[in-house]
C-alpha cells in the first residue's frame, strides 16, 4: 500500500485530508522538469516575470474565502483572523516591485580601458520547506523572490498544512506560469533528506525547529547548496519606565497570544522596569482576559486550538514547572476544552518568574508569557541576551535614540520599537545564534537567491 500523509485536524481530531507521498519516480521527474523549465525562464526578463507573479498573487488572494476555513481545520487559526491575505499581498507585491532594481547589474566605478560590473544570476532549483504556523506567509518569503530571480521552485510543505501547497499550485496554474517552474511535492522526512543530498537542489530554505535545521545541514553536507534557515525563537520585550503603557499592553498581549502563540516572532518573555511594573501587569492581565478560547470556526473565537496536542502539552509542562519553582499564574482560565492531551489551551500570564525556569529560556511556541521585573536597562539587556535564540526583540519607550542604543546591544535579527510580531518586507528577515542563518525579503533576500558573477572586460 502506498504511503500517505494525513492531516489530523486540531478542531476535533478527525482526518481532514490525506495525500499520497511522492514516489521516487515522481521526485526524479519533478527535478528534471524544474531543471528544464528554469533554462527557458532565465531568458525571460524580470519585467515579464513580474507579470506572471502579479497574476499569481491575484489568483491566490481570490481564493481567500475558501482558504480561511481550511486553515482553521488544518492548524486551528480562528476564522475571524481572515487568513494571511494582507501579509501575503504586502510581501509578494513588494518583492515583485523591487526585483528589477535588486537584480540589476552593479556597475563599478569607471576605469580607463575597462568595463566592469557584477551581475546576479539564478542559483538554479530552490527547495522551500515551509512550516504549518504561518503556512502562506513563510512560503511566499522565498517562493515569490525565488521565481522572480529566475530560479525554479520545489515546495515541500508541512504535513499539517498540505493543502496550502495545493493552493499555491492552483494559483500558479491560473497565472499561466510555465510548467515545471513551480512544483508542490508531498514528501516524507527520509525522501526530503535524500533529495537535498542528491546534489540536484541548489538552495534550501527551511523554516522550523533547531533540530530540523541541523538535519537539513547534515543532509546538504558536501553538495555546496546554499541554505536559509529560520529556526527557533524566544523573543523578548522590554518595557522601559517612559513607555506608553496603553500602547505597550495592547500590542504585547496581541504579540503574545495571536495565533495561539504559535508565531516565529511572537513575544515569549517580557521584562518591565520596576517603576511601571505593577501598572503594566494589571493592564496586561485585564486585556488578556478578553482573549477567549473556543472553536476556530466560530466567528466569536479569539484563540483557537494549537496545531497538535503535543505542542499544548509542552506549554502545560513549562507552566507547571514554573509554578513549582514559585511562579504565579494570573489568568487561571477554566475551559472545558482545555485539558491534558488536548490541543485547546487557554492563554496564561506568569509572574514571579526567573531564568531558572524553562518558560523564560526555552522556546514555548504557545499562549503563555512570563513577565519579569527589572531594575534598569542594563539588567533588561542582560536578560534579553540570556537565550540561545535571536530572531526579534522589542523595546517600548518614547526615546527612540535610547532604543537604538539599547538595540545595538541586543543579540537579535530585528529590533522593534513600540511594535512587535511583524515582518516589514523592505527589511531583511534574519536571525542570530540558534535562530539560524541567511536572510529573506528586501534586496538581501534576492542576494541570497542568486549567484554573483563578475564581468571584467578590457577594451583593446
Image: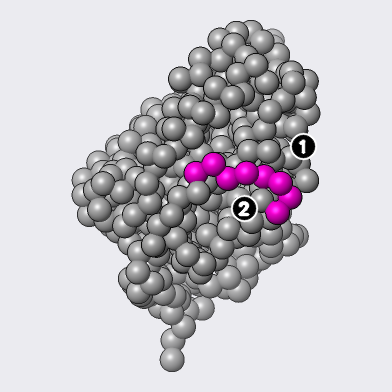
Is residue 200 shown above or below 346? below
Is residue 401 shown above or below 263? above
Q: Is residue 305 visible?
A: no
The N terminus: image quadrant: bottom left
Q: Nearer the viewer, residue 264 or 149?
A: 264
Could you say which quadrant of the image residue 316 lies in? Answer: bottom right
Give the secondary structure at mark 2.
Answer: helix
Pointer 2: what residue? 319
Is residue 164 shown above or below 382? below
Residue depicted at x 70% and y 54%? 324
Mark 1, Cα crowd under 10 Å, few <14 / some 14-19 / many 20+, is some
Is residue 3 shown above or below 35? below
Residue 214, which numbered label?
none
Q: Nearer the viewer, residue 57 or 368?
A: 368
Distance from label 1 to label 2 (Cα)? 19 Å
Task: Please give the range of residues in magenta.
Answer: 324-331
Q: Residue placed farthest to the bottom in the image? A: 1
Query: Residue 207 location, x and y as percent?
Result: 56, 51
Q: Nearer the viewer, mark 1 or mark 2?
A: 2
Residue depicted at x 26% and y 46%? 300
Pointer 1: what residue? 386
Question: Does the magenta segment cover residue 406?
Answer: no
The C terminus: image quadrant: top right
Q: How was the colour assigned to the protein in this rendering? A: one colour
Amino acid at each position: 500500500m502506498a504511503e500517505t500523509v494525513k492531516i489530523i485536524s486540531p478542531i476535533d481530531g478527525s482526518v481532514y485530508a490525506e495525500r499520497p507521498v511522492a514516489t521516487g519516480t515522481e521526485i526524479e521527474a519533478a527535478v528534471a522538469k524544474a531543471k528544464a523549465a528554469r533554462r527557458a525562464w532565465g531568458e525571460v526578463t524580470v519585467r515579464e516575470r513580474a507579470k506572471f507573479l502579479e497574476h499569481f498573487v491575484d489568483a491566490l488572494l481570490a481564493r481567500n474565502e475558501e482558504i480561511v476555513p481550511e486553515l482553521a481545520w488544518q492548524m486551528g487559526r480562528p476564522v475571524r483572523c481572515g487568513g494571511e491575505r494582507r501579509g501575503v499581498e504586502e510581501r509578494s507585491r513588494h518583492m515583485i516591485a523591487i526585483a528589477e532594481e535588486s537584480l540589476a547589474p552593479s556597475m563599478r566605478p569607471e576605469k580607463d580601458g575597462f568595463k566592469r560590473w557584477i551581475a546576479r544570476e539564478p542559483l538554479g532549483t530552490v527547495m522551500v520547506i515551509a512550516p504549518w504556523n504561518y503556512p502562506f506567509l513563510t512560503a511566499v518569503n522565498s517562493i515569490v523572490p525565488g521565481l522572480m530571480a529566475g530560479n525554479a521552485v520545489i515546495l515541500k510543505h508541512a504535513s499539517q498544512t498540505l493543502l496550502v501547497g495545493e493552493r499555491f499550485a492552483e494559483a500558479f496554474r491560473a497565472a499561466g506560469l510555465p510548467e515545471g517552474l513551480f512544483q508542490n511535492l508531498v514528501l516524507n522526512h527520509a525522501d526530503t533528506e535524500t533529495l537535498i543530498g542528491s546534489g540536484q537542489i541548489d538552495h534550501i530554505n527551511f523554516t522550523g525547529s533547531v533540530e530540523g535545521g541541523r538535519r537539513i545541514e547534515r543532509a546538504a553536507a558536501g553538495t555546496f547548496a546554499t541554505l536559509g534557515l529560520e529556526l527557533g525563537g524566544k523573543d523578548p520585550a522590554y518595557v522601559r519606565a517612559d513607555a506608553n503603557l496603553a500602547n505597550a499592553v495592547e500590542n504585547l498581549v496581541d504579540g503574545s497570544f495571536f495565533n495561539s502563540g504559535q508565531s516565529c516572532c511572537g513575544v515569549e518573555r517580557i521584562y518591565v522596569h520596576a517603576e511601571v511594573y505593577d501598572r503594566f501587569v494589571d493592564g496586561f492581565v485585564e486585556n488578556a482576559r478578553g482573549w477567549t478560547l473556543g472553536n476556530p470556526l466560530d466567528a466569536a473565537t479569539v484563540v483557537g486550538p494549537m496545531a497538535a496536542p503535543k505542542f499544548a502539552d509542552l506549554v502545560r509542562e513549562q507552566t507547571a514547572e514554573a509554578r513549582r519553582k514559585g511562579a504565579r499564574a494570573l489568568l487561571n482560565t477554566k475551559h472545558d476544552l482545555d485539558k491534558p492531551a488536548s490541543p485547546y489551551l487557554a492563554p496564561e500570564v506568569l509572574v514571579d518568574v526567573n531564568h531558572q525556569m524553562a518558560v523564560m529560556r526555552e522556546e514555548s511556541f504557545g499562549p503563555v508569557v512570563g513577565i519579569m521585573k527589572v531594575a534598569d536597562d542594563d539588567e533588561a539587556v542582560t536578560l534579553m541576551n540570556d537565550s540561545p535564540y535571536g530572531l526579534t526583540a522589542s523595546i517600548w519607550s518614547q526615546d527612540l535614540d535610547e532604543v537604538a542604543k539599547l538595540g545595538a546591544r541586543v543579540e537579535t535579527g530585528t529590533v522593534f520599537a513600540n511594535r512587535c510580531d511583524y515582518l516589514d518586507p523592505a527589511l531583511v528577515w534574519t536571525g542570530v545564534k540558534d535562530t539560524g542563518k541567511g536572510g529573506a525579503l528586501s534586496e538581501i533576500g534576492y542576494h541570497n537567491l542568486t549567484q554573483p558573477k563578475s564581468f571584467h572586460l578590457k577594451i583593446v
